[in-house]
Image (tube, coloured by chain):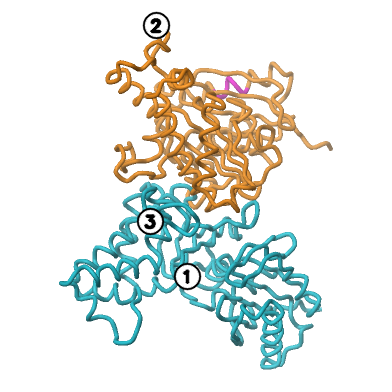
Chain colours: A orange, B cyan
Amino acid sequence: MELAKKRIGIDIGGTNIACGLVEEGQILYKTSLATNASEGKESVFNSIFKAVQMVLDNTETTIKQIAGIGVGVPGMVDMDTGVVKLAPNLYWEYVPVKEILEKKFKVPVVVDNDANAAALGEVLSGAGKGNKDVVCITIGTGIGAGLIINGKIHHGKSGGAGEFGHTIVNEKGPLCNCGSRGCLETLTSATAIVNKGKDILQQESDSILKDCIVEGQPLGAKEIFLAAQKGDKWCKEVIEESCKHLGMALANVVNLLNPEQIIVGGGVSQAGEALFRPLKKWVNYYSLDILNKDLSVDPAELGNDAGIIGAAGLIK
Amino acid sequence: MELAKKRIGIDIGGTNIACGLVEEGQILYKTSLATNASEGKESVFNSIFKAVQMVLDNTETTIKQIAGIGVGVPGMVDMDTGVVKLAPNLYWEYVPVKEILEKKFKVPVVVDNDANAAALGEVLSGAGKGNKDVVCITIGTGIGAGLIINGKIHHGKSGGAGEFGHTIVNEKGPLCNCGSRGCLETLTSATAIVNKGKDILQQESDSILKDCIVEGQPLGAKEIFLAAQKGDKWCKEVIEESCKHLGMALANVVNLLNPEQIIVGGGVSQAGEALFRPLKKWVNYYSLDILNKDLSVDPAELGNDAGIIGAAGLIK
């Protein structure tokens, strides 16, 4: 009997449920449905069931040909039971995802945090292919991390590892949602960068930032990077300060964990060299040379597919 | 054939070489010789050979009854080859410790960093017995860490993980030997605490610190803790600030790794509750509640024996 090699990977986000059929780290087919988390968890599970069926139908695959279903969830997961303990964006508390999906599909189900799944995806077939010790961070509305240690996802005692966004880099910094001051998330997330951009728009009349905004579009981190590239001194300062804080926090991780690679994904990472050049400079500046000489800092390669591929990779 | 259960553990320090016969995490017999590193590496190896022979002789054990020899070294080790790449306190660079000892004793030898070995010792038979995710820090002249992740020592890409002392907690802080500013080591090590005590002796005439020093003895961290306990406001402030910085750095590690336990050893840890009470307060203050609710912060239990027991534990 041949071992089933195909797996289904599901990435449940606050906005969309992405679902794909994956074989040897490649997506054969994928689809996406709205999460509509506010309509309740039964509605979300119906969409998940539907997405899985769509993937099976469109690839002429039966559930018996599937080794299992992996699921990434934006929350904290009990790895022993597959229960999602807390997922604020889905309004979920103690939802037995593994049990529900195994009952429905009669195949093994593994549930993990979405940042962990994305990190696994990147080391399975993306920017970190084949690497064993990788810190994979995502900079978007917030800042999260998935840690690959010795080739495996690191979960920690209660499945909550990777809260890198709540690294305190300045104890007198802005107040964070978590209650602390100066968390990295309040200084370097897209939200933080945009907030600083809004201040520039209000306060600095000589800034060209206003000319970089497309009429009718909201201000995003992208526009601030653009203005900085065009030479705007205020926006350049925002980018430099953000990279300095992120670089320092990452350097502390480098000194602690001695990873071989840092992978940076999420919306802000699309700024490319405008982000990576100063970021690498500060990581190297603040970390020990004997550790950063073996380190590379790279953009994520898989984008949203990382979540699907990594979720599928949760199935052994 | 019965499997040999006895192992020899060697902890090579800058001052002493400690060597013991270990069975099931317990030291059956131990001895200690001066390292005399300044006399060259041959002299150090002769002392190691002698210490091993003393341990065998005094326990009526033959080398054939030994499963192997584990060695902890104060430096960076290439885990694939057992070569010590750099050990400043021993004046060693690229010393093939595994090869030398295997040639001499004809048993398997495993070499690791001493902080890693001590961490392993504490989870094998000390404060962290049976725990899987533990951060073990040592606060002495400097600050080091050994990380146990998923039950195993975490080495990182080049064997350099655990440089927790070089976590930057205040980018405008004092200059560190590593070249950065505001490393934890410059703020919370015994050396840093003593330096602050010296400032108090010079500047604060109402401080009782001078009365806590035994005549002819140098000022140590111990005296500053003593003065603080007796109510000296200046020394209380030093302790509180030190614990705040250490607590913040540890909270960042808690948010990143979600460990189940932090073990604190080294000279400063002997201050007991005067250290642990404020330290726990600040760790909890700065870390996410969902992560610190599963965390305990405990003193190391094995003292110098951790290095011997952990080194022996390196042998599978």
x and y percent of residue A97 in the render?
52, 35
Amino acid at circle 2: Glu
Q: Circle 3 sits in a helix, a strand or a loop, which is it?
A: loop
Same chain under badges 1 and 3? The reply is yes
- Depth order, front residue of A18/A80: A18
Residue under label 3: B174
Question: Do the CB atoms of the residues marked 2 and 1 lie less than 8 Å apart?
Answer: no
Graded by Cα atoms within 10 Å as few (under 14), some (14 to 19) or many (20 or more), the crowding at tag 1 reads: many
- Examine the image and state in which quarter residue B185 appears: bottom left
Residue under label 1: B127
Tell which circle, 1 or 3, labels the residue nearer the N-terminal end: 1
- Depth order, front residue of A79/A147: A147
Amino acid at circle 3: Pro
Give the numbered dot on residue A215: 2
Magenta residue span: A48-52
- Examine the image and state in which quarter residue B271 appears: bottom left
Query: Please, is residue B220 above or below residue A119 in the view?
Result: below
x and y percent of residue B171 in the render?
39, 48
Amino acid at circle 1: Ala
Same chain under badges 2 and 3? The reply is no
1 vs 3, front mark: 3
